[in-house]
Image (cartoon, rainbow, N blue to C red):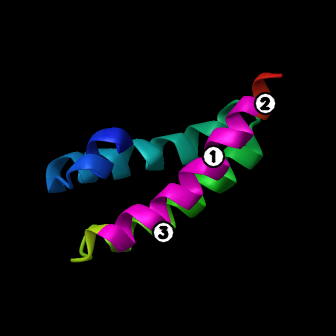
Amino acid sequence: MWKKISQQWDDDLAAEFDRKVHSLAGSAATFKMTEIGEIASALEAAFKPLLNECDDDARQAKTEQLLYKLKQLIESSAN
């Protein structure tokens, strides 16, 4: 989803992405993955205001930083 959003902003896809991140933030605690839940919550908090942002470059840069952190945590949890 993020790959598509980063190539071309789409309001509907961005809203779906926001819902999925919200679900990840909530369900991470169920699986005792609190760090992932915290990063997903931070991603959600940072991403939600971007839904109304007009500057696509700003949206991409801010969200990319948090997605990178989330990816690192997921990879480290898998090891």
Circle 1 sits on which residue?
70
For the view shown, which residue lies furthest in the right direction?
79
Q: Callout 1: few (<14), some (14-19), or many (20+) C-alpha neighbours within 10 Å? A: many
Which residue is drawn at the image coordinates 27% and 68% (left, top)?
A: 56
User: Quick check: 47 above or below 72?
Assistant: below
Residue flagged by tag 1: what amino acid is it?
A: Leu
Q: Nearer the viewer, residue 36 or 4?
A: 4
Identify the mark at residue 77; answer none if there is no mark.
2
Q: CA distance from mark 1 to mark 2?
A: 11 Å
Q: Earlier in the sequence, mark 1 or mark 2?
A: 1
Kind of residue indicated by mark 3: Ala
Q: Secondary structure at mark 2?
A: helix
Q: Residues within 10 Å of mark 2 (few under 14, many from 20)?
A: few
Provide the secondary structure element on which disc 1 rests: helix
Residue drawn 22% across the image and 46% down it: 13
Q: Are marks 3 and 2 in contact (CB under 8 Å)?
A: no
Q: Look at the image and give the residue range highlighted in magenta.
A: 57-75
The amino acid type found where label 2 is placed reads Ser
Q: Mark number for residue 46? A: 3
